[in-house]
Image: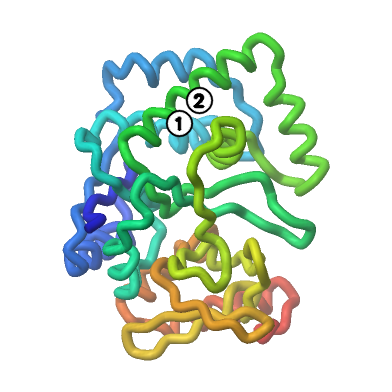
Amino acid sequence: MLNDIYIYENRDLIYLKLYERKARHLSLNITVLGPDKLKGNARYEKFLSLYEHYSVNSFEFEVSCFARYFAIAEAHKSEDAFILSDSDIYLVNNLQHIREDTSLQGIFIGSEGFYGEGSEHQISPHFSFWNKALINSFTDYLLETYERNKQDHFLARHYKMQQEKIGRTAISDMTLLYMWVKEKGIPYLNSNAIGNSLGIDHNISAVYSENGVYQSFGDRKAITLKGETVYCRSIDGRVQPMSVLHFQGEYKRVLKYFYQGSLARFYWFTVSRALKRGLKPGK
């Protein structure tokens, strides 16, 4: 049984408290870590000395995203599998069936981003599956990669190529996760694929997946709720029961209402957001 979830966060967030309450209801062990976990961490200090910033996001934001891997590697002592999670996540009761699937042990599971022309070559760790060996391998890879970059600045060249391909972007932990999987041959399963058993949402505002496109409402995935069941549907009619919804970006503002069952506010936010952007809410 997969029981442990780690979140790296240093903000006091209402929706994180609601997340923790739901996690306890699902008998999950949730550990919230902050920067204090990294005091005296030699590997993290070495990473900071090597890091070069290529991003539309702030230095502080990107470094915090990298920091969580070193903090969790420090905190997780056992060999058991665990989940690394963002704080802006809605947990669905359907998550239980994933926790009991022993075939997922020893595999890195992350959410690969897609757009109209294919993969973004980035893997989001927002609700990703790890074990001790995998996270140690990734932190090793971060140190190796940024040490190499000090010599030939290949990440700067990669950043320029990504900008030309998808516009606003970053050399982020998501970029490095994709490179790590490809270069090191890491056993990997993409959770952003319609029709698989995982039902882990890449981003509530992202409709593209590895093998299809989700139906949309107000520039986000169209979501159907039936009691404790949450599901989305692809444009070709495939139904995807969801285990996790990722309220990324602007949708963080209404995550608390979703947890509290105030769905009218969630839908009103969607409609008003679409109208402000000149969109028809049903698209």
How far across and how far down the image is residue 55, in percent?
A: 64, 35
Q: Compute the Cα span from label 1 to label 2.
A: 6 Å
Amino acid at circle 1: Phe
Q: Which amino acid does label 2 sit on?
A: Leu
Q: Quadrant of the N terminus?
A: bottom left
Question: Between 130 and 63, which is closer to the camera in this rendering?
Answer: 130
Rendered position, 102 above or below 218: above
Q: Residue at x 39, y 90 (%)?
A: 226
- Residue 57 position (above or below residue 235): above
**Labelled disc at residue 266:** none
Q: Is residue 101 left or right of residue 263?
A: left
- In the rendered image, which quarter contains the C terminus? bottom right
* Left or right side of 35 for 53: right
In the rendered view, does 22 fall on the left or right side of 208?
left
Residue 126 placement (x, y as % from top left): 45, 52
Residue at the image point whose x is 37% and y is 75% from the top: 257
- The local secondary structure at tag 1 comes to helix
The residue drawn where x is 68% and y is 79% is 275
Local secondary structure at mark 2:
helix
Determine the image quadrant of residue 181.
top right
What residue does disc 2 label? 142
Q: Is residue 178 left or right of residue 9?
A: right
Answer few, some or many: residues within 10 Å of disc 1's Cα (few below 14, many 20 plus, some between 14 and 19): many
Of residues 189 and 240, the one drawn nearer to the viewer in this rendering: 189
x and y, in percent, of residue 236 in the image: 68, 83
Q: Which mark is residue 138?
A: 1
Q: Residue reaching furthest bottom?
A: 226
Asked if one can make out residue 250 in the rendered structure from this viewpoint, the answer is no
Residue 88, compared with residue 147, is above or below; it is below
* Disc 1 to disc 2: CB gap under 8 Å: yes
Q: How many numbered tags mark residues here? A: 2
